[in-house]
Amino acid sequence: MHTHHHHHSHESAGSSGPAWYYGYCHDSGQMKMMSYPEYVNNMQTTYSKTMSNPGWAMQQWSDSLQGKKGAGAHKSGCGCHEREGCGCGCDCQCHIHCADAVEYARCGEVRRIPITFENDTRRERDVTLTLGAFATRSGKELGWQASLSETKFTLPACGEKTVLLNVPVQCGRQSPTGDNPNGVAGDGNDVDSCEVAYASLRAEGCRVRPLVIAVAVLPNHCEAHHADCGCGCC
């Protein structure tokens, strides 16, 4: 979780970029110096994960007290290629880039993502929404039949409007050629590791840049509830 940031008035040597901020990085699972856009993106990810899973924030706080890294981070010296016997949890680590909203899901679910548009002016605005196709980070479309509860509406003066984005999360086997027309790579009911899909949402008539929506598909064993089947009489 983000706790604080250090604002340096000087810039790094040989750089003409912005000042740097200190905060938690979800990609590395550690505190690090970041540029302002990267810092804001990580704050948005933290907020989204907290809203979708309040227990995640408590786990982060508990881990910090015990001197652990953030959830899903590697143990020291343990990389994703060293999965066998090391307990890294790499399969549950999601690498999310450049997203305004993040939703965590599993294969077969239909996620309903509420998006609220606000109008801080005294004039009504006619808004038209256009949803792009969900695709991998490389641009490969997944064929998900996502839809919006409304595509045209009038945003009242000094008011707001909430629209639901419905996303059916489809997983399927890849063909021998490597094509995967049925969704993210998996056996239909599960994925081997976290897969992330992205879609852009344009709002014509609203002074906001296109929003990038990310859906991170987790394997079923990630954050699973554990039940002790021990029996005192056995």
Image (cartoon, rainbow, N blue to C red):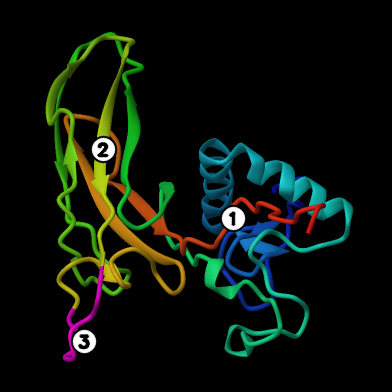
Q: Residue furthest right?
A: 66
Q: Circle 2 sits on which residue?
A: 165
* Tag of residue 178: 3
Q: Quadrant of the C terminus?
A: bottom right
Would residue 151 be found to the left or right of residue 7 on screen?
left
- Classify mark 1: residues with Cα within 10 Å, few (<14), some (14-19) or many (20+): few
Label 1 near label 2: C-beta < 8 Å? no
Q: Circle 1 sits on which residue?
A: 223
* Tag of residue 35: none
Label 2 is placed on what type of residue?
Leu
Label 2 or label 1, whichever comes before in sequence order = 2
Would residue 151 be found to the left or right of residue 226 on screen?
left
The CA distance from mark 3 to mark 2 is 29 Å
Label 1 or label 3, whichever comes before in sequence order = 3
State the residue in front, 78 or 157.
78
Please provide the residue range marked out in magenta: 172-179
Seen at 34% across and 58% down, the residue is 107
Label 3 is placed on what type of residue?
Gly
Seen at 25% across and 51% down, the residue is 200
Q: Secondary structure at mark 1?
A: loop
Looking at the picture, does residue 168 appear above or below residue 54? below
* Dominant secondary structure, magenta: loop
Membership of 174 in magenta stretch: yes
User: Residue 162, position in %: x, y?
Assistant: 30, 23
Look at discs 1 and 3 and give the one toward the viewer. 1
Q: Quadrant of residue 80?
A: bottom right
State the residue in front, 188 or 127.
188
Q: Secondary structure at mark 3?
A: loop
The CA distance from mark 2 to mark 1 is 24 Å
Label 1 is placed on what type of residue?
Glu
Q: Secondary structure at mark 2?
A: strand
State the residue in front, 231 or 60.
231
